[in-house]
Image: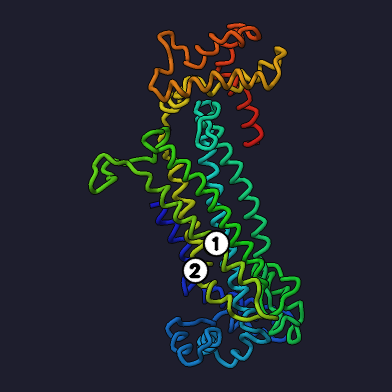
């Protein structure tokens, strides 16, 4: 229900009704600005403000003849007015209306995305503190590395989203601009004050310089910001998909009562939400390319950008909104399995402690080259034993790697048994978690 509501709220910003509402809002702001400058009489301005309206059906009828959507719009509006209609769209060009209106749509939509990101950050933060000290194995190249905590993984996600939030807020400033500068952007038919007054009414900033359009590097900034955000969300989703693999099974998407995973295999519990998120992210990234290609318009403008923006603007926003809500659902309801995390952490018979042993030897006067040779030599024995199915612990609960290290005479010349055993402590790897959290969560 939450996902559906989110999609509908965002989609409502990009309907034909919303587009023409935004056009009318811009046109009325300009009427008010002209009135403020003394051109349009008070009575005429008030009539336009009170009575101006449009019919989508009528716009479609007119556009079928004119082949020009803005003219069809202004004609439909004029039909709802009297003689005062002569002031409607006065001194403006089509892009003054369209681009400024799109700025209103983009800013309203981006505000939703920003709130979505904040929502997701809160969910991640809650789960991070819940699992601040939940031990799991860190992986490099997909191979077990050293002990970490699940909370640290989520802290990385939170920090990454914080950067996206800052980028989106900066992007908001970039796209929150409009123009009423005329056909070539030279203000020949309207003073700069007209634009300033109209933008003040609309809550936008005037573009310091424009030609016939708002420059599309602003739009490209938006598209790439959404694409980067999608890439990070996909990264999170891919990790969840890995954790849910049967061989790993450290985390799992919530599986509801009555849910089915496969039409053929009743046992299946699939990571369908995160797989869906991966696909959505691919689409959002794909829209960044036409947005960047739209930057290079001919001279003062052409309309090669227009057709692509009818696709990528609504689709990027709607898809991003849906994706963020879906990922938030995954995080908030994620089933975490600490026991399996610990089981996997011990899967390699203590090899995750190899660097700790390596770093103790130089303190005892051993060269790094010799230290590495000793530590790796025993580690390779463990790998070979694991391949042959040998138990990773003995009856005393000692890991296979610890057993080999304790039996290594060369190592025993430099480290005592107590020093070696001390290297196999999980607490060593969690001693700075609180400090990391303090840096991330302020």
Give residue 223's mark. none
Would residue 397 be found to the left or right of residue 432 on screen? left
Q: Which residue is mark 2?
A: 14
- CA neighbours of label 1 inside 10 A, class few (<14), some (14 to 19), many (20+): many
Q: Position of residue 39 (x, y in %)?
A: 72, 86
Q: Are marks 2 and 1 in contact (CB under 8 Å)?
A: yes
Q: Quadrant of the C terminus?
A: top right
- State how far apart marks 2 and 1 are (Cα): 9 Å
Of 61 and 81, the residue lying toward us = 61
Colour scheme used in the picture? rainbow
| Residue drawn at 45 percent across, 81 percent down | 56
* Residue 64: quadrant of the picture: bottom left
What residue is shown with label 1?
109
Q: Position of residue 140 (x, y in %)?
A: 55, 35
Q: Is residue 398 above or below residue 319?
A: above
Q: Residue at x 61, y 50 (%)?
A: 164
Most foreground residue, 317 or 292: 292
User: What residue is shown at x 50% (from left), y 49% (from top)?
Assistant: 234
Question: Residue 407: x and y, percent?
Answer: 53, 8
Q: Considering the numbered disc 1 on the image, is that residue within a helix, a strand or a loop?
A: helix
First in sequence, mark 2 or 1: give its number. 2
Compared across the picture, whether 399 is left or right of 26 comes to left
- Name the residue nearer the viewer: 415 or 49: 415
Q: Is residue 334 above or below residue 293?
A: above
Camera-side residue: 64 or 143?
143
Tell me the SS state at disc 2.
Answer: helix
Residue, x 42% and y 11% (percent of image)? 394
| Residue 386 placement, left or right of 306 | left
């Amino acid at each position: 229900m939450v996902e559906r509501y989110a999609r509908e709220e965002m989609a409502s910003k990009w309907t034909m009704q919303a587009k023409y509402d935004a056009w009318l809002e811009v046109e009325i702001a300009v009427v008010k600005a002209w009135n403020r400058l003394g051109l349009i009489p008070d009575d005429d301005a008030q009539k336009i403000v009170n009575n101006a309206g449009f019919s989508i059906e009528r716009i479609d009828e007119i556009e079928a003849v004119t082949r020009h959507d803005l003219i069809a719009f202004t004609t439909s509006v004029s039909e709802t007015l009297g003689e005062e209609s002569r002031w409607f769209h006065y001194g403006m060009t089509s892009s003054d209306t369209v681009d400024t209106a799109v700025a209103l749509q983009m800013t309203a939509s981006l505000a939703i995305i920003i709130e979505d990101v904040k929502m997701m950050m809160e969910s991640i933060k809650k789960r991070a503190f819940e699992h601040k000290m939940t031990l799991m194995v860190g992986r490099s190249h997909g191979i077990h590395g050293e002990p970490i905590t699940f909370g640290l993984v989520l802290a990385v996600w939170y920090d990454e989203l914080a950067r996206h939030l800052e980028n989106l807020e900066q992007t908001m400033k970039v796209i929150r601009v409009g123009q009423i500068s005329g056909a070539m952007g030279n203000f020949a038919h309207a003073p700069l004050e007209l634009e300033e007054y109209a933008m003040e009414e609309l809550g936008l900033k005037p573009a310091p310089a424009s030609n016939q359009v708002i420059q599309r590097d602003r739009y490209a900034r938006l598209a790439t910001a959404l694409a980067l955000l999608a890439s990070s969300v996909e990264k999170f989703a891919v990790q969840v998909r890995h954790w849910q693999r049967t061989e790993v099974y450290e985390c799992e998407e919530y599986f509801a009562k009555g849910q089915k995973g496969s039409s053929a295999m009743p046992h299946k519990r699939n990571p369908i939400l995160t797989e869906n998120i991966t696909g959505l992210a691919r689409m959002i990234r794909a829209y960044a390319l036409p947005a960047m290609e739209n930057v290079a318009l001919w001279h003062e403008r052409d309309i090669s950008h227009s057709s692509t923006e009818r696709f990528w603007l609504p689709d990027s926003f709607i898809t991003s909104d849906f994706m963020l809500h879906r990922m938030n659902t995954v995080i908030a309801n994620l089933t975490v399995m600490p026991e399996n995390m610990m089981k996997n952490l011990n899967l390699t018979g203590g090899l995750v402690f190899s660097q700790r042993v390596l770093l103790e030897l130089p303190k005892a006067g051993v060269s790094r080259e010799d230290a590495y040779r000793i530590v790796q030599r025993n580690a390779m024995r463990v790998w070979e034993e694991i391949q042959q199915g040998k138990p990773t612990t003995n009856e005393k609960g000692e890991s296979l790697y610890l057993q080999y290290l304790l039996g290594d005479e060369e190592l025993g010349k430099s480290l005592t048994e107590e020093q070696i055993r001390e290297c196999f402590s999980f607490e060593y790897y969690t001693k700075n978690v609180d400090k990391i959290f303090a840096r991330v969560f302020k």
